[in-house]
Image (cartoon, rainbow, N blue to C red):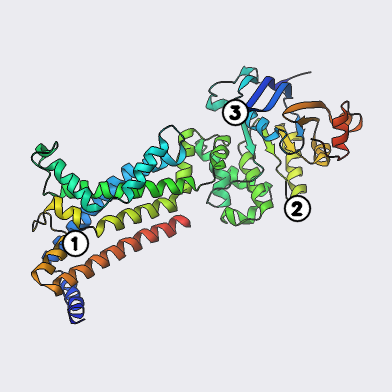
Amino acid sequence: MSDPIYLLSDAVKVYSRREVLHIEELEVQRGELFCIVGPSGAGKSTLLRLLNFLEPPTSGEITFDGRLVNGAIPLEIRRRVTMVFQRPILLHATTHQNVVYGLKIRGEKDGDDRAGRAIEQVGLGEFAQVPARTLSGGEAQRVALARAMVLEPEVLLLDEPTANLDPYNIGLIERIITHLNRERGVTIVLVTHNVFQARRLAHRVALLLEGRVVEIADVEPFFNQPRDPRTAAFVRGEMIY
Amino acid sequence: MEEIIKGLIQALHLIITLDPNVLEIAFLSLRVTGTALLFSALVGIPLGSWLGLKRFIGRRLIIAVLYTGMGFPPVVVGLLVFLMLSHSGPFGPLGWLFTPKAMVLAQVIISFPLVSGFTMASVMSVDPDLRRQLLSLGATDWQATLTILMEARVGVVVSLIAGFGSIISEVGAVMLVGGNIEGVTRVLTTAIVLETRKGNFALAMALGVILLALSFAANLAILHLQGELEG
């Protein structure tokens, strides 16, 4: 049964008079792992920013959990969604202080314990008191993931979280993502240019090209019987622009 | 060279014996400069943060005025404050001229553009995507701003060092608006000028050494704070 947590209708984003995103219709179902694939510049990150309420659409509508959220977004709605960026931006602080940040600003009393557990979950227990900016790229991305998952969001947005990482860190992060979605029921929207990753993780996949959705389908038909020739070309690894 | 050595010896003597006159002058210097720095920080840090974080029409004009203020000759500031506070000036009735209040006012005008300008630069050097990241983690606008300011804290400390340096050693403005009145507005720099004019080079030298020592100690303390902040 359809239970959309997001519903986008004619959502358009324009920067400097250039339309970079035009989503005629898009649903993200509660509890699914939804992958958005596409080449660089397709509008994937812009779409995530809209879903994270960091920017409003220039026109059109975004509905979150049945509520239209085009104007000023109440804090309690914003705090149900969080995002891990492609480039982890960590504070000049220890790993623990970075992970506990979101809980502290919410005034959570058991923040330190929860942050400690999240750090253990991403395999960084021994680095808890280390300045986070001294960590490697993969470790830093795991800190960013721990910082987001400790908030126990309903929706986790991931913007190419494994780009430029080594296979060990990619595997580790993918296991955490799968665990969050399958075991904890977190709705995840994952942006990736890695079709293999989308195939490994997703329930449904969308191909975004030049700001528009080319095709949305369940993972198997998306990769095995794509309807659109551009999708077929993309999943074969051909260059499409 | 002889005067310098004599000055150093006399400085040591004055410091060791805790000469009351020198102590009074040194404390007044610190009080005036400390108060001015406090007000500069109260005005300059929020202004610098605002300019560093926000984009609005007229921002460049404000920054241009601020940069001009950073290079404003202190003696001209002193002249302007003097005219404003003189009996015929608009703020004459306050009766601040030739009081420490006038000196503080002049020093605030001299130092706050530096505090503000350096704060702005340090806030602007923080990764512009950090704000988005913080908002995404559920921070309110105010929480995100405070966090960005904390990230820029080393630069903010540098702004205070620059502000302090610009006024502790300043002489023209405080001489004009303070008048170098013994026991009232005489600070280290104006006392040095006076003693040099009187030919008391050794005493002037001694006061100079104390001024340097105070400045060095204050900067050391601020740098220590900076080190603590850097972790």
Image quadrant in which you'd find residue B56: top left
Question: Which residue is denoted by mark 3 in the rendering?
Answer: A53
> Disc 3 on helix, strand or loop?
loop
Is residue A29 shown above or below B185?
above
Q: What's the amino acid at mark 2?
A: Asp
If you read the primary sequence from the N terminus, does the residue marked by circle 3 or circle 2 appear first? Answer: 3
Question: Which residue is denoted by mark 2 in the rendering?
Answer: A166
Q: What's the amino acid at mark 3?
A: Phe
Tell which subunit mark 2 falls on. A
Q: Is residue A71 left or right of residue A190?
A: left
Residue at horizontal 57 percent and vertical 39 percent from the top: B133
Residue at horizontal 77 percent and vertical 35 percent from the top: A38
Is residue B159 shown above or below A65?
below
Percent across and percent down for residue B205 are 18, 72
User: In the rendered image, which quarter contains the C terminus of chain A?
Assistant: top right
CA–CA distance in space, label 1 to label 2: 62 Å
Q: What's the amino acid at mark 1?
A: Thr
Q: Is residue B61 left or right of residue A16?
A: left
Nearer the observer: mark 1 or 3; the answer is: 1
Percent across and percent down for residue B149 are 45, 44
Question: Which residue is denoted by mark 1 in the rendering?
Answer: B189
Q: Nearer the viewer, residue A121 or B153?
A: B153
Residue at horizontal 70 percent and vertical 24 percent from the top: A22
Nearer the observer: mark 1 or 2; the answer is: 1
Q: Is residue A55 left or right of residue B156?
A: right
Residue A43 seen by the camera:
yes
Residue B46 seen by the camera:
no
